[in-house]
Amino acid sequence: MTSARVGRPREFDLEEALECAMRMFWEHGYDGLSLADLARGMGISKPSLYAAFGDKRELFKRALRRYEAGPASYVELALTRNTAYEVVDTLLHGAARATTSPDSPHGCLTVQGAIVSSDSDTSASDLLACWRAGLTARLTDRFTQAQAVGDLDAAASVGRLARYVSTVASGIAVEAATGVGRTELDEVADVTMRAWSAIAG
């Protein structure tokens, strides 16, 4: 009887490697890293990287999902808030907090990854454009719900409001990447919230 062939055990922690990749993309962007850079930073060989994660684009997609579930989880939290005001307040202050954490690269992976990328490979830019468009669409849906229950004025343009809020959130991330601190970015969020009644109609 032939014994069953036992596969070679993985020599690294998958979650730790993915966490490292996420932080590298967050700090350097997509185009700023080669596969050799990623493998070296993750502490694995290039063959191991391919075997565990596929190509660079697939690794970036998994890193982005990890970012959504971790540092950017404030987005999901914001969308569950009871009022449109609370949605925006949670989103903008969450962005200020996440993009200035002393334990992480400054800025936002969903913005920084595209800014650092060049035109040589549109993989990351396309993925991140879809992510940002998805955020605007989800805000539009949430504001439509708020409008239906009288939480937003019936005449308010929910699409424009969603675009405005997502643009402010992206601006917070860009400012954070240039070194602007949390106090100043919380003030940006506070100014937006003071204007919300007039903006929302």
Image (cartoon, rainbow, N blue to C red):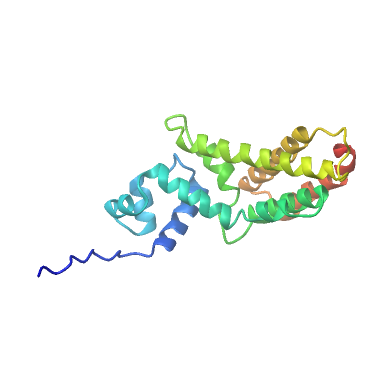
Q: Which residue is painted at 70% across and 38% down in the image?
A: 167
Please state, as top left, top right, bottom left or bottom right, where the C terminus lies in the image. Answer: top right
- Residue positioned 64% across, 42% down in the render: 174
**Relative side of 84 to 109, left or right:** right
Residue 155, percent from left and from top: 87, 32
Quadrant where the N terminus sits is bottom left
Q: Residue at x 38, y 65 (%)?
A: 13
Residue 88 locus on image (x, y percent): 77, 48
Q: Is residue 140 above or below residue 81?
A: above
| Lateral position of residue 79 relative to residue 69, left or right | right
In the image, farthest residue toward the top: 119
- Drawn side of residue 195 relative to residue 133, left or right: right
Q: Is residue 181 visible?
A: no
Residue 40 at x, y percent in the picture:
34, 54
Whether residue 133 is visible to the viewer of this picture, yes or no, is: yes
Q: Is residue 119 above or below residue 178?
A: above
Looking at the picture, does residue 187 appear above or below residue 121? below
Q: Residue at x 74, y 44 (%)?
A: 142
x, y percentage for residue 131?
A: 58, 41
Q: How many marks?
A: 0
Report the front residue among 15 and 84.
Answer: 84
Residue in front for this viewpoint, 157 or 115: 157
| View extreme (left): residue | 1
